[in-house]
Amino acid sequence: MTRWSVGETAEHLRAGRTTSLAVTEAYLARIEALDPYIGAYLTVTADLARAQAQAADARRAGGEDGPLLGVPYALKDLFTTAGVRTTAGSRILDSYVPPDDSAVYAALCDAGAVLLGKTNMDEFAMGSSTENSAFHPTANPWDTSRVPGGSSGGSTAAVAAGMAAFGIGTDTGGSIRQPAALCGVVGMKPTYGRVSRRGMIAFASSLDQAGPIARTVADAAAILGVLAGEDDLDATSAREAVPDYAAALTGDVQGLRVGVLAEYFTAGLDEAVRARVETAIDVLVDAGARRVEVSMPDVHYAVATYYLIATAESSANLARYDGFRYGSSSHAPGLWERLAETRGMGFGEEVKRRIILGTNALSAGYVDAYYSRATQVRALIRAEFERALESCDVIVGPTVPAPAFPRGAKMDDPLAMYLNDIYTIALNLAGMPGLSVPCGLVDGLPVGLQVMGGAFDEATVLRTADAYERRAPFPSAPAPLDTASLAPIR
Amino acid sequence: MTTEPDAPPAFDVDAVAALARLALTPDERARFSAQLSDVLAYVRQLADAPVESHGRIGQGEGARLREDVVTPSLPRDAAKANAADTYAGFFRVPPLRE
Protein backbone atom coordinates (compact mmCIF):
# COMPACT_ATOMS: atom_id res chain seq x y z
CA MET A 1 0.00 0.00 0.00
CA THR A 2 3.04 2.33 0.24
CA ARG A 3 3.13 2.38 -3.59
CA TRP A 4 -0.48 3.48 -4.00
CA SER A 5 -1.09 6.91 -5.45
CA VAL A 6 -3.15 9.39 -3.44
CA GLY A 7 -6.11 8.56 -5.68
CA GLU A 8 -5.69 4.81 -5.15
CA THR A 9 -5.27 5.23 -1.39
CA ALA A 10 -8.45 7.29 -1.15
CA GLU A 11 -10.30 4.72 -3.26
CA HIS A 12 -9.25 1.84 -0.99
CA LEU A 13 -10.26 3.87 2.08
CA ARG A 14 -13.58 4.81 0.49
CA ALA A 15 -14.34 1.18 -0.34
CA GLY A 16 -13.54 0.13 3.24
CA ARG A 17 -10.76 -2.23 2.09
CA THR A 18 -8.32 -0.69 4.56
CA THR A 19 -8.11 2.08 7.14
CA SER A 20 -6.05 5.21 7.38
CA LEU A 21 -4.45 3.80 10.52
CA ALA A 22 -3.34 0.66 8.65
CA VAL A 23 -1.91 2.72 5.76
CA THR A 24 -0.18 5.04 8.23
CA GLU A 25 1.36 2.10 10.11
CA ALA A 26 2.67 0.73 6.81
CA TYR A 27 4.34 4.06 6.01
CA LEU A 28 5.79 4.41 9.52
CA ALA A 29 7.27 0.91 9.28
CA ARG A 30 8.80 1.70 5.91
CA ILE A 31 10.24 4.97 7.22
CA GLU A 32 11.81 3.11 10.15
CA ALA A 33 13.35 0.53 7.81
CA LEU A 34 14.54 2.78 4.97
CA ASP A 35 14.98 6.31 6.18
CA PRO A 36 18.28 5.69 7.98
CA TYR A 37 19.69 5.17 4.45
CA ILE A 38 17.74 7.93 2.64
CA GLY A 39 17.59 10.67 5.27
CA ALA A 40 14.34 12.17 3.99
CA TYR A 41 12.94 13.08 7.42
CA LEU A 42 14.19 15.43 10.12
CA THR A 43 11.30 14.67 12.49
CA VAL A 44 8.95 11.68 12.29
CA THR A 45 5.64 12.48 13.99
CA ALA A 46 4.53 8.88 14.61
CA ASP A 47 2.18 9.52 17.54
CA LEU A 48 0.58 12.52 15.87
CA ALA A 49 0.22 10.53 12.63
CA ARG A 50 -1.61 7.70 14.42
CA ALA A 51 -3.94 10.19 16.13
CA GLN A 52 -4.65 12.00 12.85
CA ALA A 53 -5.22 8.66 11.07
CA GLN A 54 -7.73 7.55 13.72
CA ALA A 55 -9.49 10.91 13.45
CA ALA A 56 -9.64 10.53 9.65
CA ASP A 57 -11.07 7.02 9.99
CA ALA A 58 -13.71 8.41 12.36
CA ARG A 59 -14.58 11.16 9.87
CA ARG A 60 -14.99 8.55 7.11
CA ALA A 61 -17.11 6.40 9.38
CA GLY A 62 -19.26 9.49 9.91
CA GLY A 63 -19.88 9.79 6.18
CA GLU A 64 -17.22 12.34 5.22
CA ASP A 65 -15.16 11.98 2.06
CA GLY A 66 -12.36 13.93 0.41
CA PRO A 67 -9.37 13.34 -1.85
CA LEU A 68 -6.83 13.53 1.00
CA LEU A 69 -8.93 12.25 3.91
CA GLY A 70 -6.75 9.71 5.73
CA VAL A 71 -3.84 9.93 3.24
CA PRO A 72 -0.34 10.13 4.84
CA TYR A 73 2.11 12.77 3.63
CA ALA A 74 5.50 14.42 4.25
CA LEU A 75 5.79 18.16 4.95
CA LYS A 76 8.92 20.17 4.20
CA ASP A 77 10.34 21.50 7.46
CA LEU A 78 9.83 25.07 6.26
CA PHE A 79 6.13 25.08 7.25
CA THR A 80 5.30 25.86 10.85
CA THR A 81 3.40 23.20 12.80
CA ALA A 82 2.15 24.25 16.25
CA GLY A 83 3.83 22.11 18.90
CA VAL A 84 6.05 20.26 16.38
CA ARG A 85 9.67 21.38 15.96
CA THR A 86 10.22 23.36 12.76
CA THR A 87 13.86 23.91 11.76
CA ALA A 88 14.01 25.18 8.16
CA GLY A 89 17.00 22.80 7.99
CA SER A 90 18.99 25.26 10.11
CA ARG A 91 21.00 24.97 13.30
CA ILE A 92 19.69 28.41 14.31
CA LEU A 93 16.15 26.93 14.58
CA ASP A 94 17.10 23.44 15.78
CA SER A 95 14.88 23.63 18.85
CA TYR A 96 12.22 26.03 17.56
CA VAL A 97 8.64 24.94 18.37
CA PRO A 98 6.20 27.27 16.60
CA PRO A 99 3.12 28.66 18.34
CA ASP A 100 1.01 28.59 15.16
CA ASP A 101 0.19 26.39 12.19
CA SER A 102 1.11 27.49 8.68
CA ALA A 103 -1.82 27.96 6.29
CA VAL A 104 -0.69 24.94 4.25
CA TYR A 105 -0.58 22.62 7.28
CA ALA A 106 -3.93 23.95 8.50
CA ALA A 107 -5.50 23.26 5.09
CA LEU A 108 -4.11 19.72 5.09
CA CYS A 109 -5.43 19.15 8.63
CA ASP A 110 -8.87 20.37 7.54
CA ALA A 111 -8.72 17.96 4.59
CA GLY A 112 -7.91 15.09 6.97
CA ALA A 113 -4.44 14.31 5.59
CA VAL A 114 -2.05 12.52 7.98
CA LEU A 115 1.31 14.12 8.83
CA LEU A 116 4.07 11.47 8.86
CA GLY A 117 6.80 13.97 9.60
CA LYS A 118 8.82 17.04 8.66
CA THR A 119 11.30 16.60 5.85
CA ASN A 120 14.90 17.51 5.22
CA MET A 121 15.83 20.46 3.05
CA ASP A 122 18.64 22.80 2.16
CA GLU A 123 18.90 25.32 4.98
CA PHE A 124 16.22 28.03 4.52
CA ALA A 125 15.56 26.47 1.08
CA MET A 126 18.93 27.69 -0.21
CA GLY A 127 20.32 24.96 -2.39
CA SER A 128 19.77 22.45 -5.17
CA SER A 129 20.95 19.21 -3.57
CA THR A 130 19.67 19.00 0.05
CA GLU A 131 23.33 18.86 1.08
CA ASN A 132 23.08 22.25 2.79
CA SER A 133 20.93 20.86 5.62
CA ALA A 134 22.47 21.51 9.04
CA PHE A 135 21.47 17.99 10.11
CA HIS A 136 22.34 15.42 7.43
CA PRO A 137 22.14 15.07 3.66
CA THR A 138 19.38 13.19 1.82
CA ALA A 139 20.14 10.47 -0.72
CA ASN A 140 18.41 9.90 -4.05
CA PRO A 141 16.35 6.67 -3.77
CA TRP A 142 17.32 5.77 -7.37
CA ASP A 143 21.03 5.83 -6.49
CA THR A 144 21.99 6.64 -2.92
CA SER A 145 25.42 7.94 -3.97
CA ARG A 146 23.63 10.82 -5.75
CA VAL A 147 21.72 13.89 -4.61
CA PRO A 148 17.91 14.00 -4.68
CA GLY A 149 18.00 17.63 -5.85
CA GLY A 150 16.81 20.44 -3.64
CA SER A 151 15.83 22.29 -1.75
CA SER A 152 12.70 20.12 -1.21
CA GLY A 153 14.81 16.95 -1.51
CA GLY A 154 13.42 15.36 1.66
CA SER A 155 9.80 15.50 0.50
CA THR A 156 10.64 14.31 -3.03
CA ALA A 157 12.86 11.45 -1.80
CA ALA A 158 10.15 10.39 0.66
CA VAL A 159 7.54 10.19 -2.11
CA ALA A 160 9.91 8.41 -4.52
CA ALA A 161 10.99 5.86 -1.89
CA GLY A 162 7.45 5.01 -0.79
CA MET A 163 7.85 6.77 2.55
CA ALA A 164 4.85 9.10 1.97
CA ALA A 165 1.89 9.06 -0.41
CA PHE A 166 2.57 12.69 -1.28
CA GLY A 167 4.76 15.55 -0.16
CA ILE A 168 4.68 19.30 0.16
CA GLY A 169 7.58 21.47 -0.95
CA THR A 170 8.40 25.06 -1.73
CA ASP A 171 9.80 26.47 -4.94
CA THR A 172 11.72 29.76 -5.00
CA GLY A 173 13.95 28.98 -8.00
CA GLY A 174 13.03 25.39 -8.82
CA SER A 175 13.06 23.73 -5.40
CA ILE A 176 10.00 21.57 -6.14
CA ARG A 177 10.43 20.93 -9.89
CA GLN A 178 14.18 20.17 -9.90
CA PRO A 179 14.13 17.51 -7.12
CA ALA A 180 10.90 16.08 -8.57
CA ALA A 181 12.70 15.59 -11.90
CA LEU A 182 15.76 14.02 -10.25
CA CYS A 183 13.65 11.66 -8.08
CA GLY A 184 11.15 10.62 -10.76
CA VAL A 185 8.01 12.17 -9.26
CA VAL A 186 5.60 14.96 -10.22
CA GLY A 187 6.23 18.38 -8.67
CA MET A 188 4.34 21.61 -9.23
CA LYS A 189 5.07 25.26 -8.52
CA PRO A 190 1.75 27.11 -8.67
CA THR A 191 1.38 30.75 -9.71
CA TYR A 192 2.87 33.23 -7.23
CA GLY A 193 0.11 33.96 -4.71
CA ARG A 194 -1.99 30.86 -5.54
CA VAL A 195 -1.20 29.17 -2.20
CA SER A 196 -1.01 31.10 1.07
CA ARG A 197 2.48 31.47 2.54
CA ARG A 198 1.37 32.27 6.08
CA GLY A 199 3.66 30.30 8.37
CA MET A 200 6.01 29.32 5.53
CA ILE A 201 9.42 30.49 6.72
CA ALA A 202 10.49 33.20 4.29
CA PHE A 203 13.50 32.97 1.97
CA ALA A 204 12.80 35.36 -0.94
CA SER A 205 9.34 36.82 -0.55
CA SER A 206 8.72 37.92 -4.13
CA LEU A 207 9.49 34.38 -5.37
CA ASP A 208 8.56 31.79 -2.71
CA GLN A 209 5.60 29.52 -3.43
CA ALA A 210 4.35 26.23 -1.92
CA GLY A 211 3.21 23.28 -4.00
CA PRO A 212 2.54 19.54 -4.25
CA ILE A 213 4.91 16.61 -4.85
CA ALA A 214 3.16 13.41 -5.95
CA ARG A 215 3.41 10.17 -7.90
CA THR A 216 0.87 11.20 -10.54
CA VAL A 217 -0.37 14.42 -12.13
CA ALA A 218 -3.91 13.62 -10.95
CA ASP A 219 -2.61 13.47 -7.37
CA ALA A 220 -0.88 16.85 -7.81
CA ALA A 221 -4.17 18.32 -9.08
CA ALA A 222 -6.09 16.97 -6.08
CA ILE A 223 -3.53 18.31 -3.60
CA LEU A 224 -3.39 21.73 -5.26
CA GLY A 225 -7.18 21.90 -5.00
CA VAL A 226 -6.83 21.59 -1.21
CA LEU A 227 -3.96 24.07 -0.88
CA ALA A 228 -5.07 26.84 -3.27
CA GLY A 229 -7.12 29.82 -2.21
CA GLU A 230 -7.21 33.27 -0.73
CA ASP A 231 -5.91 33.99 2.78
CA ASP A 232 -6.58 37.30 4.51
CA LEU A 233 -3.43 36.80 6.57
CA ASP A 234 -1.12 36.66 3.52
CA ALA A 235 -1.06 40.02 1.73
CA THR A 236 0.26 38.38 -1.45
CA SER A 237 -2.33 35.60 -1.64
CA ALA A 238 -4.44 35.82 -4.79
CA ARG A 239 -8.18 36.40 -4.95
CA GLU A 240 -8.73 34.50 -8.20
CA ALA A 241 -11.32 31.73 -7.89
CA VAL A 242 -9.91 28.20 -7.58
CA PRO A 243 -11.08 26.03 -10.48
CA ASP A 244 -11.76 22.29 -10.24
CA TYR A 245 -8.28 21.06 -11.20
CA ALA A 246 -9.30 17.40 -11.20
CA ALA A 247 -12.06 18.13 -13.70
CA ALA A 248 -9.51 19.73 -16.04
CA LEU A 249 -7.74 16.39 -16.52
CA THR A 250 -9.64 15.28 -19.61
CA GLY A 251 -6.73 13.57 -21.36
CA ASP A 252 -7.58 15.67 -24.41
CA VAL A 253 -4.89 17.91 -25.93
CA GLN A 254 -6.37 18.07 -29.43
CA GLY A 255 -5.37 21.44 -30.92
CA LEU A 256 -3.43 22.52 -27.82
CA ARG A 257 -0.52 24.74 -28.85
CA VAL A 258 2.64 23.45 -27.18
CA GLY A 259 5.46 26.00 -27.32
CA VAL A 260 8.94 24.47 -27.45
CA LEU A 261 11.35 26.95 -25.91
CA ALA A 262 14.43 27.11 -28.15
CA GLU A 263 16.75 28.54 -25.48
CA TYR A 264 16.18 25.48 -23.25
CA PHE A 265 17.61 23.14 -25.89
CA THR A 266 21.01 24.77 -26.45
CA ALA A 267 24.53 23.94 -25.28
CA GLY A 268 24.66 22.63 -21.71
CA LEU A 269 21.72 20.26 -22.11
CA ASP A 270 22.74 16.60 -21.81
CA GLU A 271 22.08 14.90 -25.18
CA ALA A 272 20.25 11.96 -23.61
CA VAL A 273 18.02 14.34 -21.61
CA ARG A 274 17.28 16.24 -24.82
CA ALA A 275 16.24 12.98 -26.50
CA ARG A 276 13.84 12.05 -23.67
CA VAL A 277 12.24 15.51 -23.71
CA GLU A 278 11.89 15.52 -27.51
CA THR A 279 10.24 12.10 -27.33
CA ALA A 280 7.83 13.44 -24.70
CA ILE A 281 6.91 16.36 -26.96
CA ASP A 282 6.29 13.86 -29.80
CA VAL A 283 3.86 12.00 -27.50
CA LEU A 284 1.85 15.21 -27.07
CA VAL A 285 1.92 15.90 -30.82
CA ASP A 286 0.79 12.34 -31.56
CA ALA A 287 -2.12 12.98 -29.17
CA GLY A 288 -3.24 15.95 -31.26
CA ALA A 289 -1.30 18.88 -29.80
CA ARG A 290 0.31 21.35 -32.20
CA ARG A 291 4.05 22.02 -31.82
CA VAL A 292 4.96 25.72 -31.92
CA GLU A 293 8.54 27.00 -31.77
CA VAL A 294 8.99 29.85 -29.27
CA SER A 295 12.01 31.91 -28.28
CA MET A 296 12.97 34.09 -25.32
CA PRO A 297 16.29 35.64 -26.33
CA ASP A 298 16.93 37.18 -22.90
CA VAL A 299 15.97 34.24 -20.69
CA HIS A 300 19.68 33.43 -20.22
CA TYR A 301 19.83 36.39 -17.81
CA ALA A 302 17.54 34.54 -15.37
CA VAL A 303 20.16 32.89 -13.15
CA ALA A 304 22.13 36.11 -12.64
CA THR A 305 18.90 38.03 -11.99
CA TYR A 306 17.71 35.45 -9.49
CA TYR A 307 20.95 35.38 -7.50
CA LEU A 308 20.68 39.12 -6.93
CA ILE A 309 16.96 39.35 -6.15
CA ALA A 310 16.72 36.16 -4.04
CA THR A 311 19.85 36.94 -2.05
CA ALA A 312 18.84 40.56 -1.49
CA GLU A 313 15.44 39.51 -0.18
CA SER A 314 16.95 36.73 1.94
CA SER A 315 19.42 39.13 3.56
CA ALA A 316 16.41 41.18 4.71
CA ASN A 317 14.26 38.19 5.71
CA LEU A 318 17.03 36.50 7.68
CA ALA A 319 17.85 39.67 9.61
CA ARG A 320 15.12 38.54 12.04
CA TYR A 321 17.30 35.71 13.42
CA ASP A 322 18.86 37.50 16.36
CA GLY A 323 18.75 34.64 18.90
CA PHE A 324 16.79 36.77 21.37
CA ARG A 325 13.17 36.00 20.54
CA TYR A 326 13.64 32.44 19.23
CA GLY A 327 16.37 30.20 17.96
CA SER A 328 19.78 29.32 19.33
CA SER A 329 21.90 32.07 20.85
CA SER A 330 25.56 32.66 21.72
CA HIS A 331 26.61 33.88 25.17
CA ALA A 332 28.80 36.79 24.06
CA PRO A 333 28.43 39.66 26.58
CA GLY A 334 27.69 42.64 24.29
CA LEU A 335 24.60 43.11 22.14
CA TRP A 336 26.31 43.46 18.76
CA GLU A 337 28.89 40.76 19.50
CA ARG A 338 26.17 38.35 20.55
CA LEU A 339 24.13 39.12 17.45
CA ALA A 340 27.04 38.53 15.06
CA GLU A 341 28.24 35.43 16.90
CA THR A 342 24.72 33.93 17.12
CA ARG A 343 24.26 34.35 13.38
CA GLY A 344 27.79 33.21 12.56
CA MET A 345 27.33 30.01 14.59
CA GLY A 346 23.69 29.37 13.68
CA PHE A 347 23.77 29.79 9.90
CA GLY A 348 25.47 27.33 7.58
CA GLU A 349 27.97 28.26 4.90
CA GLU A 350 25.58 28.64 1.95
CA VAL A 351 23.20 30.81 3.97
CA LYS A 352 26.05 33.08 5.03
CA ARG A 353 27.28 33.25 1.44
CA ARG A 354 23.86 34.36 0.24
CA ILE A 355 23.33 36.86 3.06
CA ILE A 356 26.65 38.47 2.15
CA LEU A 357 25.84 38.47 -1.56
CA GLY A 358 22.41 39.98 -0.87
CA THR A 359 23.64 42.54 1.64
CA ASN A 360 26.25 43.59 -0.90
CA ALA A 361 23.62 43.88 -3.64
CA LEU A 362 21.53 46.21 -1.46
CA SER A 363 24.34 48.32 -0.02
CA ALA A 364 25.06 51.93 -0.95
CA GLY A 365 27.18 52.11 -4.09
CA TYR A 366 26.01 48.71 -5.32
CA VAL A 367 22.23 48.89 -5.29
CA ASP A 368 21.90 50.49 -8.73
CA ALA A 369 24.38 48.18 -10.39
CA TYR A 370 22.98 45.01 -8.87
CA TYR A 371 19.56 44.97 -7.20
CA SER A 372 17.83 47.72 -9.20
CA ARG A 373 19.22 46.37 -12.44
CA ALA A 374 17.97 42.88 -11.54
CA THR A 375 14.42 44.14 -10.95
CA GLN A 376 14.48 45.60 -14.47
CA VAL A 377 15.78 42.40 -16.05
CA ARG A 378 13.10 40.50 -14.15
CA ALA A 379 10.42 42.63 -15.83
CA LEU A 380 12.07 41.92 -19.20
CA ILE A 381 11.94 38.15 -18.55
CA ARG A 382 8.27 38.27 -17.54
CA ALA A 383 7.49 40.25 -20.71
CA GLU A 384 9.22 37.53 -22.76
CA PHE A 385 7.07 34.83 -21.11
CA GLU A 386 3.92 36.85 -21.80
CA ARG A 387 4.92 37.35 -25.44
CA ALA A 388 5.72 33.66 -25.91
CA LEU A 389 2.36 32.68 -24.43
CA GLU A 390 0.58 34.76 -27.08
CA SER A 391 1.50 32.08 -29.62
CA CYS A 392 1.02 28.98 -27.48
CA ASP A 393 -1.03 27.61 -24.57
CA VAL A 394 1.84 26.02 -22.62
CA ILE A 395 5.64 26.16 -22.91
CA VAL A 396 7.67 22.97 -22.58
CA GLY A 397 11.31 22.05 -22.10
CA PRO A 398 13.59 20.06 -19.82
CA THR A 399 13.36 20.57 -16.05
CA VAL A 400 17.03 19.79 -15.47
CA PRO A 401 20.09 19.87 -17.76
CA ALA A 402 21.32 16.45 -16.60
CA PRO A 403 20.32 13.59 -14.25
CA ALA A 404 21.18 13.65 -10.53
CA PHE A 405 24.85 14.36 -9.82
CA PRO A 406 27.00 12.58 -7.19
CA ARG A 407 26.77 13.83 -3.63
CA GLY A 408 29.56 16.27 -2.88
CA ALA A 409 30.32 17.01 -6.54
CA LYS A 410 29.32 20.68 -6.51
CA MET A 411 29.64 21.70 -2.88
CA ASP A 412 32.85 23.69 -3.43
CA ASP A 413 31.62 25.49 -6.53
CA PRO A 414 28.53 27.60 -5.76
CA LEU A 415 28.20 28.94 -9.31
CA ALA A 416 28.11 25.38 -10.75
CA MET A 417 25.44 24.51 -8.18
CA TYR A 418 23.40 27.63 -9.05
CA LEU A 419 23.51 26.74 -12.77
CA ASN A 420 21.75 23.46 -12.03
CA ASP A 421 18.55 25.54 -11.81
CA ILE A 422 19.06 27.10 -15.22
CA TYR A 423 15.72 25.85 -16.61
CA THR A 424 13.55 26.45 -13.55
CA ILE A 425 14.51 29.90 -12.27
CA ALA A 426 12.99 32.06 -15.02
CA LEU A 427 9.47 30.86 -14.22
CA ASN A 428 9.78 32.06 -10.62
CA LEU A 429 10.92 35.47 -11.83
CA ALA A 430 7.85 35.59 -14.11
CA GLY A 431 5.57 34.39 -11.28
CA MET A 432 3.90 31.77 -13.50
CA PRO A 433 2.99 28.11 -12.81
CA GLY A 434 5.04 25.12 -13.88
CA LEU A 435 5.25 21.41 -13.33
CA SER A 436 7.80 18.64 -13.81
CA VAL A 437 6.55 15.22 -14.88
CA PRO A 438 8.91 12.24 -15.25
CA CYS A 439 9.76 11.59 -18.93
CA GLY A 440 12.16 8.67 -18.76
CA LEU A 441 15.47 7.43 -17.44
CA VAL A 442 19.02 8.35 -18.43
CA ASP A 443 21.58 5.79 -17.24
CA GLY A 444 18.95 4.50 -14.81
CA LEU A 445 18.20 7.95 -13.35
CA PRO A 446 14.96 9.91 -13.87
CA VAL A 447 14.65 13.18 -15.77
CA GLY A 448 11.66 15.47 -16.20
CA LEU A 449 9.58 17.27 -18.78
CA GLN A 450 8.76 20.79 -17.61
CA VAL A 451 5.36 22.23 -18.55
CA MET A 452 4.89 25.97 -17.95
CA GLY A 453 1.78 28.11 -18.35
CA GLY A 454 0.26 31.54 -17.95
CA ALA A 455 -0.55 33.07 -14.58
CA PHE A 456 -3.39 31.20 -12.81
CA ASP A 457 -3.69 28.72 -15.67
CA GLU A 458 -2.60 25.71 -13.59
CA ALA A 459 -5.50 23.79 -15.15
CA THR A 460 -3.93 23.80 -18.64
CA VAL A 461 -0.49 22.91 -17.26
CA LEU A 462 -2.00 19.97 -15.36
CA ARG A 463 -4.11 18.87 -18.34
CA THR A 464 -1.05 18.82 -20.61
CA ALA A 465 1.10 16.86 -18.14
CA ASP A 466 -1.71 14.42 -17.39
CA ALA A 467 -2.33 13.81 -21.10
CA TYR A 468 1.37 13.03 -21.51
CA GLU A 469 1.47 10.78 -18.42
CA ARG A 470 -1.55 8.74 -19.60
CA ARG A 471 0.25 7.96 -22.86
CA ALA A 472 3.73 7.43 -21.39
CA PRO A 473 3.36 5.98 -17.89
CA PHE A 474 6.56 6.13 -15.84
CA PRO A 475 7.94 3.16 -13.85
CA SER A 476 7.35 5.16 -10.72
CA ALA A 477 9.36 3.10 -8.20
CA PRO A 478 13.13 2.83 -7.98
CA ALA A 479 14.59 -0.64 -7.38
CA PRO A 480 14.28 -1.84 -3.77
CA LEU A 481 17.18 -0.67 -1.61
CA ASP A 482 19.68 -3.29 -0.53
CA THR A 483 20.05 -1.81 2.94
CA ALA A 484 22.51 -4.50 4.05
CA SER A 485 25.11 -3.00 1.71
CA LEU A 486 24.49 0.66 2.65
CA ALA A 487 25.90 2.82 5.42
CA PRO A 488 23.32 4.86 7.37
CA ILE A 489 23.11 8.49 6.25
CA ARG A 490 21.88 9.77 9.61
CA MET B 1 26.99 57.50 -3.73
CA THR B 2 25.87 55.77 -6.92
CA THR B 3 27.93 53.91 -9.44
CA GLU B 4 27.66 53.18 -13.13
CA PRO B 5 25.89 49.84 -13.69
CA ASP B 6 28.89 48.29 -15.40
CA ALA B 7 31.50 49.39 -12.83
CA PRO B 8 30.55 48.40 -9.27
CA PRO B 9 33.19 48.98 -6.61
CA ALA B 10 35.47 46.15 -5.48
CA PHE B 11 33.99 43.52 -3.15
CA ASP B 12 35.00 43.79 0.53
CA VAL B 13 33.77 40.71 2.40
CA ASP B 14 34.60 42.10 5.87
CA ALA B 15 32.65 45.31 5.34
CA VAL B 16 29.62 43.42 4.04
CA ALA B 17 29.73 40.82 6.85
CA ALA B 18 29.77 43.68 9.37
CA LEU B 19 26.70 45.23 7.70
CA ALA B 20 24.95 41.85 7.86
CA ARG B 21 25.87 41.33 11.56
CA LEU B 22 27.57 38.07 10.65
CA ALA B 23 30.72 36.73 12.33
CA LEU B 24 32.89 34.78 9.85
CA THR B 25 35.79 32.47 10.53
CA PRO B 26 39.12 33.26 8.78
CA ASP B 27 38.52 30.25 6.51
CA GLU B 28 35.06 31.46 5.53
CA ARG B 29 36.37 34.96 4.88
CA ALA B 30 39.01 33.67 2.46
CA ARG B 31 36.70 31.21 0.71
CA PHE B 32 33.78 33.65 0.36
CA SER B 33 36.03 36.36 -1.10
CA ALA B 34 37.06 34.09 -3.97
CA GLN B 35 33.67 32.43 -4.52
CA LEU B 36 31.64 35.63 -4.38
CA SER B 37 34.03 37.41 -6.72
CA ASP B 38 33.22 34.65 -9.25
CA VAL B 39 29.49 35.07 -8.69
CA LEU B 40 29.72 38.86 -9.01
CA ALA B 41 31.68 38.51 -12.24
CA TYR B 42 28.87 36.27 -13.51
CA VAL B 43 26.03 38.65 -12.55
CA ARG B 44 27.79 41.59 -14.18
CA GLN B 45 26.33 40.34 -17.50
CA LEU B 46 23.06 42.07 -16.50
CA ALA B 47 24.62 45.37 -17.57
CA ASP B 48 24.13 44.21 -21.17
CA ALA B 49 20.41 43.30 -20.87
CA PRO B 50 18.03 45.40 -23.03
CA VAL B 51 15.81 46.49 -20.14
CA GLU B 52 14.36 49.69 -21.57
CA SER B 53 10.57 50.03 -21.58
CA HIS B 54 9.71 47.05 -19.40
CA GLY B 55 9.71 48.79 -16.00
CA ARG B 56 10.75 46.81 -12.98
CA ILE B 57 9.32 44.18 -10.63
CA GLY B 58 10.06 44.85 -6.99
CA GLN B 59 9.10 43.15 -3.76
CA GLY B 60 5.51 43.70 -2.71
CA GLU B 61 4.07 44.03 -6.21
CA GLY B 62 0.41 43.10 -6.11
CA ALA B 63 0.31 42.86 -2.33
CA ARG B 64 -2.83 44.23 -0.71
CA LEU B 65 -3.28 45.59 2.78
CA ARG B 66 -6.13 44.69 5.08
CA GLU B 67 -8.19 47.32 6.84
CA ASP B 68 -6.30 49.10 9.59
CA VAL B 69 -8.22 47.62 12.51
CA VAL B 70 -6.92 45.90 15.60
CA THR B 71 -7.31 42.12 15.56
CA PRO B 72 -6.21 39.48 18.10
CA SER B 73 -2.50 38.76 18.01
CA LEU B 74 -0.16 36.14 19.44
CA PRO B 75 -0.58 35.85 23.24
CA ARG B 76 2.45 37.15 25.15
CA ASP B 77 3.31 33.77 26.69
CA ALA B 78 3.29 32.09 23.29
CA ALA B 79 5.47 34.84 21.84
CA LYS B 80 8.03 34.36 24.63
CA ALA B 81 7.98 30.56 24.62
CA ASN B 82 11.06 30.23 22.37
CA ALA B 83 13.04 33.15 23.82
CA ALA B 84 16.56 32.62 25.17
CA ASP B 85 15.93 34.92 28.15
CA THR B 86 12.93 36.92 29.41
CA TYR B 87 12.29 39.32 32.27
CA ALA B 88 8.97 40.70 33.52
CA GLY B 89 7.19 39.87 30.29
CA PHE B 90 9.91 41.19 27.97
CA PHE B 91 12.74 39.70 25.95
CA ARG B 92 15.99 40.31 27.81
CA VAL B 93 19.03 41.26 25.71
CA PRO B 94 22.60 42.36 26.60
CA PRO B 95 23.08 46.09 27.18
CA LEU B 96 23.73 48.14 24.09
CA ARG B 97 26.16 50.23 26.11
CA GLU B 98 27.52 49.58 29.65
Image (cartoon, helix red, strand yellow):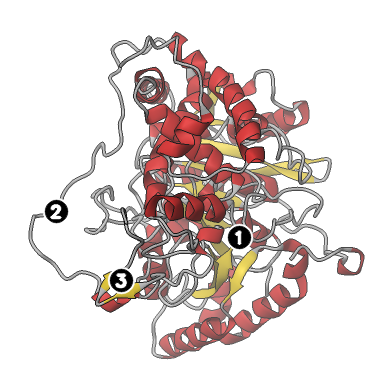
Contact check, label 3 and label 2, Cβ < 8 Å? no
3D distance between C-alphas at marks 2 and 1:
34 Å
Name the residue at 34% across, 19% down: A368
Chain letter of mark 3 equals B
Q: Secondary structure at mark 1?
A: loop
Q: Which residue is mark 1?
A: A120
Specify whether residue A303 is in view.
yes
Q: Are marks 1 and 3 on the same chain?
A: no
Residue A135's image quarter?
bottom right
Name the residue at 54% across, 81% down: A49
The crowding category of the residue bearing disc 3, from other C-alpha atoms within 10 Å (few below 14, some 14 to 19, many at least 20), is: some
Name the residue at 41% across, 25% down: A385
Q: Is residue A472 above or below residue A16?
A: above
Name the residue at 30% across, 56% down: A229
Specify whether residue A395 is in view.
no
Quarter in which the C terminus of chain B is drawn = bottom left
Quarter in which the N terminus of chain B is drawn = top left
Is A219 positioned to the left or the right of A383 in the image? right
Chain letter of mark 2 equals B
Q: Secondary structure at mark 3?
A: helix
* Pick the front one: B97 or A329: B97
The crowding category of the residue bearing disc 1, from other C-alpha atoms within 10 Å (few below 14, some 14 to 19, many at least 20), is: many
3D distance between C-alphas at marks 1 and 3:
26 Å
Q: Which residue is mark 2?
A: B66
Identify the residue at the far right of this view: A485
3D distance between C-alphas at marks 3 and 2:
23 Å
Q: Which residue is mark 3?
A: B79
Q: Are marks 2 and 1 on the same chain?
A: no
Is A313 positioned to the left or the right of A25 in the image? left
User: Mark 1, mark 3: which one is toward the viewer?
Assistant: 3
Amino acid tagged 2: Arg
